[in-house]
Amino acid sequence: MEKQPLPSDDISKETEADGGYGEEDTQLASEPAARAGWNSKIEYFLAQVGFSVGLGNVWRFPYLCHQNGGGSFLLLYVLLMLVIGIPLFFLELAAGQAIRQGSIGVWRHISPRLSGIGYSRCCFVCFFVALYYNVILAWSLFYLGNSFQYPLPWEQCPEQGNTTVKECALSSNTSYFWYRKALDITDSIDEMGSFNTYIVLCLLAAWTIVCLGMFKGIKTSVKVMYFSSIFPYVVLFCFLIRGFLLDGALEGVTFMFYPKLEIWGDVQVWRQAATQVFFALGLGFGSIIAYSSYNPKNNNCHRDAFTVSTINFLTSVLATLVVFAVLGFKAKVKVQDCVVSNTEELVELFNNGFVDHSLMPAFNYSDSASVDVDDYRSWFKQFGSKIPVNLSDCDFEKEMQKGVEGTGLAFIAFTEAISRLPGSPFWSALFFLMLLNLGLSTMFGTMEGILAPLTDRFKILANNKTKFTIFSCILGFTIGLLFTQRCGSYFVTMFDDYSATLPLIIVVVFETFTVSWLYGADRFLDDIERMLGWRPYVVYKYLWKYISLLGMLGLLAATTIRMVMKRPTYMAWDKETATEVYLQYPDWALAVLTSLIIFAMLPIPVGFIRALLLEKNKRASRDSEIGQYSIVNTDENAKRLRLKAKICISQCNRATESCWCLHLRASCRLDSKINVNIPCETYGSPLRTSGKKRKV
């Protein structure tokens, strides 16, 4: 007998009420045909690419590539993308497209006992990410607004009277603007401080933009994505062309891609590469499932998985080229400034009689701006140790090794490089507009991962989707005010590093295990074959069951061990020394951090226990029903009714109404003579389906 599809939504509710009965025997099916869909494949691609390509591609991937061996890290990243990233991405695409529901509906169908996975994703993990991610958009809006002035406000240190502000003089103009003007940051997370008015207003603007883009669902968000998904590529190519015309760009890119094969033996490098693959594709958020649920059933989601993953990787490489071309220029300028400064100091020492004439360089030190860097470094190597003051060797590689990521790259290092470009306000506005659009596309996907599952699950929310969207954005803004305090950036770091990482990994481990082992990889491939008309390669079976699952378990173990063995720390700003320092989280912050992780995971065990209790109650109810209908349990009636049930089930694929056979229960909605409320023991021996095809 052909395996039967999952029941429709009303029937699946009845199945869930059974406490998970039949979870071994259910198959993938679709939502009703009335579900909204994409107007074109281009819209879908823009949405999926816009969600997966985010800020991490620009400010996280280049840093990891730089710190972990350049070209060697790229090879490792591609390997993990092929054996973990793409298979799991394909799994989520196929599940969403086949069932045509959000993550809650998907897991209620695949495994009702683990339906908590869907709630964990949308109600907690996605919401946590949306809270702090929109704060980053608020920061981008703040910098974008400050880009429309000349000179840029972070180009020079402010002065008090005739003296440069001490905090700026001890650090740099861009660091001072970021920590003091933008964030007005406290010295630690223990010092709460007041709300930052400018950031509050920018956060309100960010949530307003998200709300306007989402309040009519994908019909409105996709219109914004035509710009927000394409514009960043225009900016990246503009920066790439401009960057390669700068002095030092080639050296920066060469330094970046210099291979270090020894990194393959470092466990931490593997952990970082796997984590980047995981977050770059957006696995575990539920947004992939939500977006693919609007696709037609015959859409080639296998090709989509490869296409989106390839675009994501190439975008990361493009962003890396841009970042290191610009940082190479910045390093070259700083090295040249270093040579000028040291030469002037050397001349002053010579004029005051502290340096002998024999130690003076052969180059024209009277014009310090014309001194060649190589000439200076050659002289320093020979005589630098004999100079009575500590002069720097002005090494280009040392400047490039000062790797920065995240906000440090975007709001400090990159802004410093931009400020040295001709027409700096234009390039600054372009850069932060790009960051804003990258973040918006990801936010649209994150919000869809929240809204779609809940509106699919609860009819009252579906009937009031616009109001629910507005309410969600208002709630997000209200809670997000936590991040607009003077210590708010420390909470952003906490949420980014811990509240989402571990829960997302756990969710994907459950997802992979449930599909490949509980539901069955072969059955899942059968469902995809029925949906697409062709069977995916058998290698996916082994990737899902072993390689991808073991890879995610390894990542989970490495992340957990790292959190347990080393007390979590965060980077703080010391106002007195004007330097970045690492501090340990206080006990209350660790309690908050632990609570966030527990709350994010709580729906999974709660849903499982609830399903077991419902299952127990249902079994007791069935035992009583057998006694009530024992009068009709004759051999003749049993044969007749079992035959009708077999005929009904054999016609299931051609039926317009739902018809299925679950654990110890045969039901047929096509034949009114068979009472669907009577357990199949009433008709004789139970009819059961299995994962394998069998004759009836």
Image: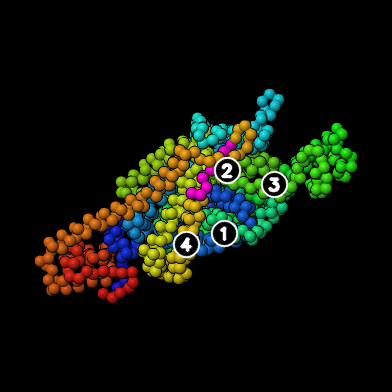
Q: Are marks 1 and 2 in contact (CB under 8 Å)?
A: no
The amino acid type found where label 1 is placed reads: Tyr
The residue at 44%/56% (across/down) is 508
The amino acid type found where label 2 is placed reads: Thr
Mark 2 sits on what residue? 407
The amino acid type found where label 3 is placed reads: Glu
The amino acid type found where label 4 is placed reads: Leu
The residue at 16%/71% (across/down) is 638
Q: Are marks 4 and 1 in contact (CB under 8 Å)?
A: no
Question: Would you call the spot at circle 3 few (<14 residues within 10 Å), some (14-19), or many (20 or more)?
Answer: some
The answer to whether residue 560 is visible is: yes
Left or right, 403 with reference to 389: left
Observer-nearest of 194 and 574: 574
Q: Earlier in the sequence, mark 4 or mark 3?
A: 3
Q: Is residue 537 above or below residue 183?
A: below
Give the magenta-colored segment's residue range: 564-573
Q: CA distance from mark 2 to mark 4?
A: 32 Å
Q: Most extreme residue toward the bottom, as rendered?
A: 695
Q: CA distance from mark 1 to mark 3?
A: 25 Å
Q: Earlier in the sequence, mark 4 or mark 1?
A: 1
The residue at 23%/71% (across/down) is 646
Mark 3 sits on what residue? 399
